[in-house]
Amino acid sequence: MESLSFSLLSYPISNQTGLSKSSPGMIVASRSNNKNHNHKKTQQLPKNLLYRRRTEVPPDSYPVLYPVKETETDSDYDDNEVNVNLDDNVIWEPDEIEAISSLFQGRVPQKPGNLNRERPSPLPLPYKTRPLGFPTSKKIIRTQPARSNRQPVTNLLYKNPTFLITLARDIRSLPCGDGSNNNDDVSLVLDQWARFLRKGSLSLTIRELGHMGLPGRALHVFNWVQKQPHLFPDDRVLASTVEVLARAHELKMPFDSLDRFIALASRPVYEAMVKGFVKGGNTRLALRLISTARESKRTLDPSVYAKLILEIWKNPDKRTLVLPLLEELANRDDLKLSQQDCTAIMKVCSKLGRFDLVEALYDWFKKCGGVPSVVMYTTLIHSRCLEGKYREGMSVVWEMEGLNCLLDLPAYRVVIKLFVVLNDLSRTSRYFAKLKESGFKPTYDIYRDVIGVYMVAGRLAKCKEIRHEAEMAGYMLDELLQG
């Protein structure tokens, strides 16, 4: 039988039996028989293959694939039943095989990225960051505006300073009568508020009437209080009335009744009488009350002694009476003085030349936990300057600088005078500049001291500059420059 061969150009023919692919684009089909034939007949392609409607599709390109070695996975094992035969004929049970195979299982696939990244720490929780301690009270803390709406009117008025001062102004505005019905005039104002008042309420009203210069009206208010059973007896109202009358020299009683009053008066009323006499300038009666209290072993507040010492110091003829009062204060075991009273006594002691008492009071005040003010520092520096201890005064200045203490005009005067005595030109100029930067106007003595220290240093141009500044401020310093 004849052998038939033909070629195809890029014709997709499956590789079946009897067909072979000899070269790209040509396929040879052969059919052989037992006989060998040398004649081969070629067959041309049909028209649909010779004249194609579309161009030839380029061959597909695939990436190069490399052989991968297969590894054993869990699929190689039989999950149901696997028997392993070793040399010693040991048979593994399925649960044992499952347990061992679980040890060699691969890790769980994760998302791409840094596998060793550190997670941020969680935010602190309030109940973990709160310091340990006792639980807070269940009692609700209300502010004054929120609480005042639920309080009765009595609680809002009986100790309200604005309301009590308004009562004093209303009483002051009452018309002045003939003197017989003044109590009735006061009752016109106080009767409408009587139900809202309590004991001690009108003590502020009485003191305010005393500041207004109306001690008679204050006495009328006290007489009205005596008629109110829910307001009297009250030591606070009585003490305020006695202080106002004593200050205005209206407390009129004979000395016999004064001794009886001293024996029966309580401590607040007794101290109010002494303060009234001191503020009124009647130091004779104040000293008599102090001596009577000493004889009867009655203890008075140290502030009473401080006010009496200051008032006595104003009279040069009675300055010798100050030392016994200071000694009596020094012997007190329960001595308690405010910062103002302690500074005032230090000033008196420095003027008396008792510099040891000044140092003792300053040391006592600091040991008691008090914080000295700029006035106390100034008093101490001035006392040490008067004593001639200028270096010790500089230590106080350094202490003030360490505490960043703000100086006032008297403090600048004392400090600059200290620097001038020490002939410290740099500190003098610096504090003189700070004085003007603080907004203070230098006084005549400050200009005089600063010009003097510049003259000693030989800086005449600076002296003329400060002299011109002093003349612009209204001071005449020509005599100092000529000298």
Image: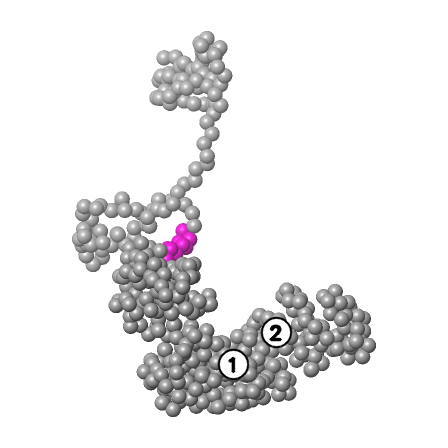
Q: Quadrant of the C terminus?
A: bottom right
Residue 189: in magenta span: no
Read off the residue under disc 2: 410
* Of the pair 33 and 151, the residue shown nearer to us: 151
The colour scheme of the drawn protein is: one colour
Where residue 254 appears, as percent x and y from the top left, is 39, 83
Tell whether 267 sits left or right of 392: left
Residues at discs 1 and 2 in contact (Cβ within 8 Å): no
Residue 248, position in %: x, y?
Answer: 46, 73
Q: Is residue 122 magenta?
A: yes
Closer-to-camera residue (311/220): 220
Q: Quadrant of the N terminus?
A: top left
- Crowding at label 2, few (<14), some or many (≥20) Cα neighbours within 10 Å? some
What residue did someone put label 1 on? 310
For the stretch drawn in magenta, the main secondary structure is: loop
Q: Earlier in the sequence, mark 1 or mark 2?
A: 1
Disc 2 secondary structure class: helix
**In the rendered structure, which amino acid carries the disc numbered 1?**
Leu
Residue 401 visible (yes or no): yes
Towards the viewer: 283 or 462: 283
Query: Element at badge 1?
Result: helix
Displayed quadrant of residue 242: bottom left
Lateral position of residue 204 relative to residue 388, left or right: left
Which region is colored magenta?
Answer: 115-125
